[in-house]
Amino acid sequence: MGLEMEGYRLDKSLETHAEAEGLIEEIHGRHPMDDLLRTDRLPHIWCPGCGLGTALTCFLSALRKSELDLDKVSVVSGIGCTGRVAGYVRLDSFHTTHGRAIPFATGLKLANPALKVVVFSGDGDLVTIGGNHFIHAARRNIDITVICVNNFNYGMTGGQAGATTPIGGLTTTSPYGNYEYPFNVSALAAASGAVYVARWTVLHARRLERSIIEALLKPGFSLVEVISPCPTGFGRRHKQRQGLDTMRYYHEHGVIQHGADPREADIGLSGAVVEGKFVDIDKPTFLEQRTRRLEQVFDK
Amino acid sequence: MSANKDGLLSGEFFMQGDIASAEGAICAGCRFFGGYPITPATEVAQRMSERLPLVDGMYVQMEDELASIIAVLGASWGGARAMTATSGPGFSLMMENIGLGIMLETPCVLVNVQRGGPSTGLPTLAGQSDMMQARWGSHGDYAIIALAPSSPQELFDLTIHAFNLAEIYRLPVLVMTDAEVGHMTEKVVIPPPEEIDIVPRRKPTVPPEEYLPYRVEPGELVPPMAVAGDGYRFHTTGLTHDERGYPATADDSAQWPLVQRLIDKIEKNKDKIIILEKDGLDDAEVAVVSYGIAARTAVWPIQMAREEGIKVGLLRLVTVWPFPDEQIRDLAGQVESIVVPEINMGQIVREVERCAAGQAEAISVPHPGGGIHDPQKVLNAIRRAAGRK
């Protein structure tokens, strides 16, 4: 009787709990975000100390404050720990394939421009396997909001190196330390044409929430990069055993610099974590560009 | 020839196959095209880029074929009738997300203008070597629908039909044409819009709180489909899921009913889906079974063989997948041998052989791609099949 068997049983008992939603409510009471969550799917799969709960709470709170019509909001995720967000929100939500959340969102938005489409996914999904779509959606200035939770590794598969892993980062596929140059997610978005780019650690929850509101209400391609602890996959190999250790690290190393050049804001294993609102410019969206061009041609 | 106030064409045209496919899509109500240029399918994208803005539709040129097919899936969930068009290398790139389309049960149409392969192969020259890939190319078990037009007119007609099948059975429907038909210019008749049958999407009738995205009523195999923004606030996932659309990955309890239904909704409706065209089979001792341009190439050799006194007829597979097992079995019970010309090294002939199950000999007439069969070779195969020479 090993732990694995316990694991299988746990999953089954979760389903039983899901059936007994009323009982859970009786015992635990209601969470302020319950009406935006698929409570019959809770508890979530995320590890203790993970930043995804905070990132999701900030998103839902921002969504509520944005006063958007929630029937017209769609959430699209790819694959990975962050990719599970789509499954927990009580909105039209799509859990798609690895790396392809952004082009799915592009089709969704262009088929029905009345929708507010949010892509919520991780760094591995969005800028490693899905990097091409990320830069092209930003280039086109497709009117979607991308929330990229960056924990510098592939968490779900057990802590492997990806395109955001800092030089020297220890992961299960960089056991001698990562020697590949990493992507800076915010700089990549800015360079590709995003009209709104902000970065916050999950420690700065109120500022994160405010940035998500701004991003949701900004026409065009907006990116909010959320720096998040991953104690299981990444932190524990870098002297941050608990999520709290990483939060303490953010407290000590976080430097708020609105308007900073994101190219100067690389994130390493040590040194400052520069955060703030980096880009907030106005530029016609893909659809506005299209309408303008077609009107020029056809209304002559 | 005329275009009505909605920008829809009708009348008689001298039209290229690829363009006929694009016009068929527009007549079928397609208002979203996500694609990437690739020979010999590029003309479909070109035509759509020109035509869609005129009919209040959306053309978007994606960054690659991965993005193209998944943007099409997204557009379908946004409520649009959506399609893409590609050829071999792009078809390979689309495989994973064809699987997502199967799993999410997403209506859409994919036109594959086949060329010679493998790899970059023969970009400008015909092939039919993606037929097995169409059936089995994405991982996992599923059923698919694939149609094989043999003329520009049929490319027009079957593209419309593909959209209807996609809505009825909720899956990506493949129009498997080739460079010969796609680049052939012939007479195409476009009927007036009121004469074109369009099957609308079946949406849920229950209120949102009662809606389960993957619940099918007893006796049905295809659930109704809500789209984003309708207020249903549904979830859907490429993971194995239950009726709620929620992941159910702890064991095989949801996997069984889901995968079985994804297969059954096609297999149990084969009679409604399969279209075959028969010519001269009543007294036949030899049958030619073929599809697409290869079936057209077989017409002259069949005539020649008939003039030589060989009793031979043609069974053309307009629907290649699902495969007409029963009809081939019956045919094998009637004829001595079945000749299968196809522009590949022998793909569908394996299906014919499987269904014939030894009752009739299945004779492959292969071609590696790069053109159509030399009709003389097909004639020789028919003669051999009839025991002549």
Image: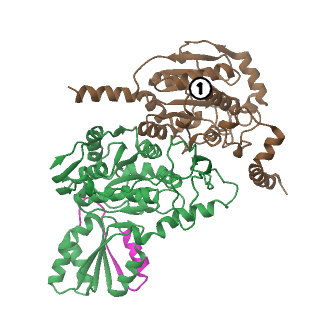
Chain colours: A brown, B green
**What residue do we see at 30% from left, 58% from top?**
B177
Residue A168: x and y in percent read 65, 28
Kindly identify which residue carries mark 1: A225
**What residue do we see at 59% from left, 39% from top?**
A91
**Type of residue at label 1?**
Glu
Instruction: Assess whether residue B264 is covered by the magenta stretch.
Output: no
Q: Which structural element holds mark 1?
A: strand
**Which residue is more in the foreground, B86 or A287?**
A287
Q: Report the label total.
A: 1
Question: From what the image shows, is residue B45 above or below residue B180?
Answer: above
Relative to residue B199, is residue A65 drawn left or right?
right
**Which residue is more in the foreground, B17 or B382?**
B17
| Chain under callout 1 | A
Q: Which portion, as a residue range, is magenta?
A: B346-373
**What residue do we see at 63% from left, 40% from top?**
A90
Q: Residues within 10 Å of mark 1 (few under 14, many from 20)?
A: many
- Looking at the rendering, which quadrant does residue B217 occupy? bottom right
Q: Quadrant of the C terminus of chain A?
A: top left
